[in-house]
Every structure is written in C-alpha cells, then in structure tokens.
Amino acid sequence: MKRASKATVTHSELAGFNKLRSPVWIFDIEQMQMWWANNAALNLWDALSVEELTNRDWSIISEATQTRLQNYFQQLKQGKTIVEQWTFYPQGSTVSVRCVCSGIQIESGRLLMLVEGVTDIMECIESETLRSIEALRHTTMMVSLYNLDTTPVMQNPAAIRCYGDEKNALETGSVFRKHFGDSRVFEQVRACVAAGVVFSAETQVITLNGIRWHELDVRRINDPATGQPMILVNEKDITDRKLLEQKLQEYTTQLQQSLTFEAMLKRITDKVRDSLDQSQILQTVVQELCFGLGVTCCNTALYDLEQGTSTICYEYATTNPGAQMRVAQIASFPEVYQHLLDGQHLQFCSITPNPRRGQVAMLACPILDDKGVLGDLWLINHKNHAFNELEIRLVQQVANQCAIAIRQARLYQSSLVQVEELEKLNQLKDDFLSTVSHELRTPISNMKMAIQMLKIAPTNERRERYLEILQAECTRENELISDLLDLQKLESESYAIVLHEAINLQDWLPKMIEPFESRMQESKQTLQINLSPVPPLITDRASLQRILAELLNNACKYTPASGEIVLSICYKLAEAATIFTISNPTEIPADQLPRVFEKFYRVPQGDRWQKGGTGLGLALVQKLVEQLQGTIVVESSQGCTTFTVTLPNQPKEGARDQRSEVRE
C-alpha cells in the first residue's frame, strides 16, 4: 500500500475522466451510495447514465462486503492506497476488476473513495481461482496468514470482524500471541509450527466480542507469492456449541439430583398422604428433609394468625436441638415473616451468631394452600452453604404436600360437624320440596274439581261460577311458578337490574298506585300518601315498582273495611337515602314477626278478604331490596304493622348493572 495525498474535486472537474478507457468511479462508503462514474465505468456497471447509477440501492450488499468497505474507509482516512481484486455483479452479470482505491475529498469536505479499475488482467486468471478468492471473502471461517514471527500478512473479512484489521493496525508486532489468554496454548502452537506439525485444538481466544471458543487449525505453508514460509490459521467459532455442551452437563447433573429428590418427595408423600394425624405428618417431614438434604437442622412451625404467633411444633437436629415448642411473635420479625405470609421463600445467613448454633445459613419456606399460610418449614446448615434451585423447589413441594395433609387432618376433625349440618340441610330441603309440591298441587286439585263440576253443572250460573274458580286457580298457579322462578333468579344473582335510571317520584308514583285505588274503593279502604320533596332516586324502576306493589298488595289483604293504608316517602340527607314506609291497621303476633320473610309463610287467619297468594311475596321483596343495595325492616305493635324500605339515592359503583328480560 502507498500513501496518497487527499484531493478535493467537484463534478465539473471530473469531466476529463470520461476520455479514459479504464473505468473510474467515486463511491461514498459512509452513505453506501455511488457518487460519480466516467463513461467506461457506466459500461462496466451496465448503467445508462450517472444519475441512474447513483440512484441504485447499494445498501443490500453482503455483511462481508460491508466489513471490507469499512476497513477500506479506515485506511483511506490514513491516506493509504489499496490495491485488491473485486468481483462485481452489475445487473446480474459477473465482472472481475483489479481496483486501485484511494481517498478523495469533495467540496463539502467529506472523504469518498476513488476507484480506478483494470479489467484486462482478469483474462489471465482462471475462473476456479476467482471462485476460490470470492469464497474466501464470504465464508464465516476465519482465515489469517502470518509471518513466522507472527506478524500479520493477510486476513479474510471474517477474521477482520473477529479480531479487527491487524494488518493495518498502528501496532502490529506479534498480534497473534495476543489472541490467547493462556500463553501456554500459544507456546504449543509455536512449537508445532516449528516442528512442521499441524496444531488442532479447541481453545478460548480473545476477540473484539470478548472471550470466545474457537476450533483452531494452525499449520506451516509456503507463501504462493514469495515462497517464504508462513503460518496459516483457520478458525471456527464454536462458542454456541460449547455453551450447549456446558448446559447439557449442567442439565445432566440437575437431572440426577432431580431424580434423587423425586424419590425423596415420593417417599415423604407416601408417608403423609394417608395420615390424618397432624403431629405425625409434621414429624415425618422434618426427619426426611434433614436426612435427605444433609442439613444440620430442620423444624416446622404452625401459625396462629389471630394471636400473631408462630410455634415450632417439631424439630430434628443432628447437633444442638432445643427449639421445639418455642413461640415467636410474628410482628417482632417483619423482615422474615412478611415474606412468608406473602407466600415467598427466603434464604439468608445470620449476621449475629446464634447462641446455640453460631452463624448458620437458613432457608425458610411457607406451608400454604389456596386458603392461606398454615405455617413454615426451616432448614439450617453451616454458614457457607447456599441452597440451590432444586433444593428450594423440593422444600416447596414438600411444604405443599404438608399443607394438603394438614388441611385433610383438620377437615377430618370437623367432618362430623359437617355431616350433622348436611343432615339438617337435607331435612330443610325435604321440607321445602314438600311445601312446594303441596302449594303447586293445591291449585291443580281445585282446577280438576272445577272441571269435573263444569261437566255436571245444571245451570249457566253454576257453570260461570266454576269457570271463575278455574280461572282464579290458573292465575294462582301461574303466579306461584313465576314467583318461584324470580326468587330462584334473585338467590342466584341472575335477576337483571339496572342501577343508573333516575326516577322522579313526584311524577312516577301516581301512575304506579293507580291500580290500587279502584281495588281499595271496592274494599272500602282508604290510601293516604305522604310524599315529601325527594331528589331523583337512581335505582331499577321495575324492581322498585315490584317492591311497592307487593307491599301495597299485602297491606290490602290484611286491612279491614274502612281501614286506612298509609304510604310515606321522605329523604334522609345524612344517609343520602330515600325512606318508604307502608303502614296498615293490622298487628302481626310477636312470635310470628321473624317469619314474615320466609318462603310460603302466611300469617294465620290474617287474610281478611280471602284473596290468597303464593306466600312468596315478602321473600321476593326482601331479595329485591338487597339487590338495590337497600334494607327492609318490619315492626308491628298496638294494632299497626309498618314495613320500612331504605334505598340509597346513589348506588355504589361496581353493583350489578345489566338488562335482560324482566317480568313486570
């Protein structure tokens, strides 16, 4: 290479180069773009004009070529001239050119690459040789050539990417020696070269990307250009393979340990699975873990979260036992128990020596299930021990099995109580089914009787009477089934409500009570309404109408002739709620009052007008009020019964808010 002075040119000054027969062009390496070309270069690149050539996309060249050009650019900045053989592929054809590259400055002061091409010499080079040169440039195998004193002579692009351009470095010398972190490997290489023996090995080398594993093939050859002895180095990066081999070895070790731990876990699980004795379960666990993991101590504690205590129930130690039944206040050690209560394990080494054990390494793992933390397991070993991932996972799995076994033991102790409760529930279910079947059967029996009487009725008057009975019983049966379905929806929370409808009670109430006015006139009852100024009530319109209708209907049934029913509505600012009270002059016996919201319950001899009913009205009202986030209470004394319903004017967010088909 030669030193070249930098020239500054413009496009107009390059016009004279068009008379040359040799191709000359200028390439911008930084922007990967052709800047100018003479006519001979246009022919070489198969371009119609300079503009067409400069507009081509040059960014798609290979990684090896980009590395080669960047290496050129660094040398051009040093004022060097580069002479090398290139193979180009203009418009799909192949052209081999011997290129003389030098730096040239343009008006903006930027440095570009001036290329002078010679194509005639390539006619003397065999195509096979050209292919070999091209393959050497694009292979991922690193190929380098050194003098016997290990100074660099040649590097292919892969070697340059790995070690940098050693040939054109400011300091060359024995750069090959610097590849090896272990100088003994270099000495072995040099000895083999001196003896004419091929050196082959897998070793670590120092590259631009850090320490890598390479497969080396180093041998002595003669330089085809000078005939002098040289050192040829072929290298292949095998770091990925080495890492895989290392991981495979680690996995093999872990697999062996996993199999050992799996057998231990199975042994522990088999011992505690069938046991319903909590004490035996805990004792088995601490002994097996202490022996299996070779620790100096293992203990287990159970928590009393209400009292905030942790009590060591069982301990097994090879040296210095004595912690069993020791009680610790959970709040006194938040740095430990907060992790355990959050379901997290932790391991640490004590800073202050324990009075009995000295400085030790500890692993604490919570015993927990989906219902919460039951206790913990502690493993203690010498201070330099670190519990690995497999050991921690084993302790966690044992803790899980321990939690299951403890929960089973506790469930067993409470199973008798649960059986008694189930028997009570079964009895209640049987009573409910018996009541439902009776209530459903009664209207059907009446309908059957009415149908039979219709067949033998002697007069039209009788037939009309039996038809009325038949229609009334059909209505009763339909209402009973509808009420049962609505009650089931309310209890399963599938009854649709919408809690964002604002109701102006002053406008809505008169229309709502209109059907009751004619009924009360027939029964010679009076209805008094006390409606104070009330802000708009945000609630479910259909549910509110159902509640008031059921309560008014109930009041009508149990109010004698000339009796007065009072409906009062007011607003309580302190509670931000609307209060509905419905009173009628009938007293419910004190012993019957707690049962008025029960399904199918009717106050004995209370229905003065013999209107009947399903016995589900008040049960439905109670469930509807709860769905509207309200409350309902009943009071009865001194010949008067009052139902009070309290509904919030603004329901809480997050309440059910969906609309589907609602039975009016």
Image (cartoon, grey):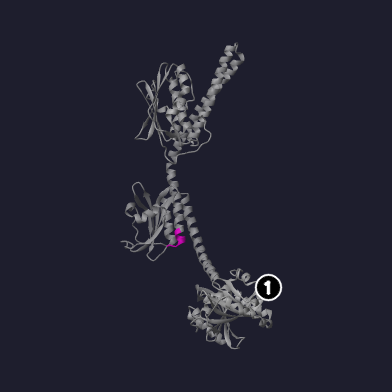
User: How many neighbours does mark 1 have within 10 angstroms: few (below 14), some (14-19), or many (20 or more)?
Assistant: few
What residue type is disc 1 on?
Ser
State whether residue 182 is above or below residue 538. Answer: below
Image coordinates of residue 505 in percent, x first then y, are 43, 29
Please tell me which residue lies in front, 471 or 384: 471
Q: Residue furthest front?
A: 12
**Count the marks: how many?**
1
Q: Main secondary structure of the magenta part?
A: helix
Please name the residue that numbered disc 1 is placed on: 93
Quadrant hosting residue 552 = top left
Q: 149 or 323, which is in the foreground? A: 149
Q: Residue at x 33, y 47 (%)?
A: 307
Residue sitting at x 45%, y 56%: 396
Q: Residue 359: give x, y in percent of width and height.
A: 34, 64
Asked if residue 142 can be seen in this view, the reply is no
Whether residue 249 is visible? yes
Let me know if residue 389 is in the magenta part. Answer: yes
Q: Which residues are magenta?
A: 387-392
Q: Quadrant of residue 18?
A: bottom right
For residue 604, above or below residue 653: above
Picture coordinates of residue 327, whole percent (x, y): 33, 52
- Residue 182 vs residue 376: left or right? right
